[in-house]
Amino acid sequence: EVQPVESGGGLVQAGGSLRLSCAASGLTFSNYDLSWVRQAPGKQRELVATITRGRGFTNYADSVKGRFIISRDNAKNTVSLQMNSLKPEDTAVYYCNVVGGGGRLNYWGQGTQVTVSS
């Protein structure tokens, strides 16, 4: 069974940085689109960033543009999210999402907590 595993969450002060990583085994990573999705308490899930298979095009939520960078390493089956200039409103559980097969294959990690103090 494919199970992405996130790491790198924690507590950081506003203005600080964190780097999240997600690793997944049991699949050919390069065939999948990879995303980070977050959910804050009492709010709906928000798509934060996506990096496509193939050419690795990236897309970001307006709320994180210019502060977050998504990257992938297909050889290591990992996707990362570098988060800079963090704000208290970035506080959420961050999930790794791996999608392939035209959407038929959809895997989620368990999530990692990011807390930004003011």
Image (cartoon, rainbow, N blue to C red):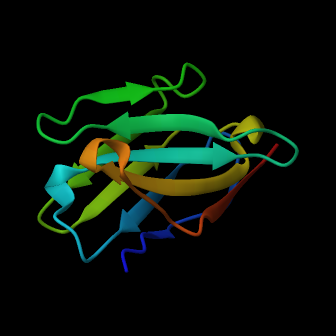
* Point 42% across, 45% down: residue: 35
Farthest residue in the front direction? 104
Question: Which is nearer the eye, 70 or 84?
Answer: 70
Give 17 or 77, whichever is nearer the viewer: 77
Task: Please determine whether, in this image, residue 77 is positioned above or below residue 50.
Answer: below
**Labels in figure, total:** 0
Q: Among all residues in the image, which is located at the extreme top?
A: 62
66 vs 88, left or right, is left
- Point out the image quarter for the N terminus: bottom left
Pinpoint residue 17: horizontal percent, then vertical percent: 54, 48
Residue 108 located left or right of residue 92: left
Residue 2 x/y as whole percent = 36, 74
Q: Position of residue 47 (x, y in %)?
A: 55, 36
Q: Residue at x 16, y 64 (%)?
A: 28
> Residue at 82% of width from left, 43% of height from top?
118
Q: Specify whether residue 85 is in view.
A: no
| Residue at x-position 53% and y-position 25% | 61
Q: Is residue 103 visible?
A: yes
| Farthest-out residue, bottom | 1
Residue 54: x and y in percent read 12, 39
Q: In the drawing, does residue 8 fall left or right of residue 43?
A: left
Q: Is residue 90 left or right of residue 118?
A: left
Looking at the image, residue 66 lies above or below residue 118: above
